[in-house]
Amino acid sequence: MNIRFKNGGTTIESILRREFGAGFATVHGRADDSVLDGRSLIEFLRQQPGISAVSSHHFRYPKPAVPGWVIFDCCFLRHPLDRLVSLYNQYRRTNSPDPLCVRASCQAPREFMKQLLRDSPHLVIDVQVTQLASAGAFARPANERDLEKATEIFRDMAVPGIVELFDESLIAAEYFLKPAFPELRLHHSPENVSRPAHQRPERSQDLERTFVDLWGTDVYEDLLRLNQLDLELFRRAKVETQRRLFLMPDLEERLVEFKARCAPLRLRASANAPEREPVRVKVAAGAAG
């Protein structure tokens, strides 16, 4: 069960499609904002007994519990402000009449985020905590109880991960899923990526500078203040991911072997990828307004 929050879900879906073949399916609601709960998943699987793996934009926690069934859930988190950058880029390059796509296509990052801050709190305030703890239903700002619930859900996942340690998360998944799926291989070529991994700053100071350059100091500080719970969830998610890696034998050798499997896929994808004109947006950092 792959749950997608604009956090590498397309890549995971591609892996599952390759590994499970006809036993893989996507399950989505009729509308972009549909919500599918555990009952929806169980109903689908009972109607499709040949399906072993599913992926969806619309699944929401909690994971269903069915006697006699074992459900392996997979969900990736990422730095919440980097997620907003990715969200803007995704809206911007999507040709759709959706109002957010239309706005992103004609607004610079600063103007787009300022309008989200004014009009769409559910899209910019602790989104990942809300998704995990409240099934994505935004009725109020998330609180500490939601953070603890989201943390527990993440730590209990069969395949938890963070985008910033994407390969490492999948290496851990291969190892710990081996008793159930001994032949499962999770090597990949990144898909639907708005910003390549090598372009993401690693140091916190550089990351902050990137956000300030995009949004201005005032918008960055507003978004930072409104995502403190998501930032703490991200920190805890990173700790859990690293804990699982620490438990693995021969980690360095596994990492080298995994990247060797990924290399031909990425080379092939690079050769087939159409060239895209980069979007150049000039933003005055710290501009008021």
Image (tube, rainbow, N blue to C red):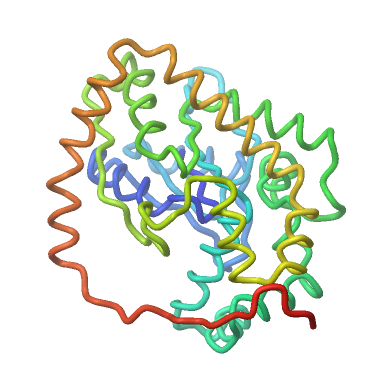
Q: Quadrant of residue 155?
A: top right
- Residue 26 x, y percent position in the rendering: 40, 52
Q: Is residue 120 left or right of residue 177?
A: right
The C terminus, quarter of image = bottom right
Compared with 56, 31 (above or below) is below
Compared with 135, 208 (above or below) is below
- Residue 162 x, y percent position in the rendering: 50, 39
Residue at 56% of width from left, 54% of height from top? 207
Residue at 21% of width from left, 29% of height from top? 256
Compared with 68, 98 (above or below) is below
Number of numbered callouts drawn: 0
Q: Is residue 148 left or right of residue 162?
A: right
Q: Is residue 138 left or right of residue 22?
A: right
Residue at 70% of width from left, 37% of height from top? 232
Residue at 67% of width from left, 37% of height from top? 233
- Residue 10 x, y percent position in the rendering: 39, 54
Compared with 173, 61 (above or below) is below
Residue in the foreground of this view, choosing between 38 and 242? 242
Q: Which residue is most to the bottom?
A: 106
Residue in the foreground of this view, choosing between 48 and 21? 21
- Residue 198 x, y percent position in the rendering: 35, 53
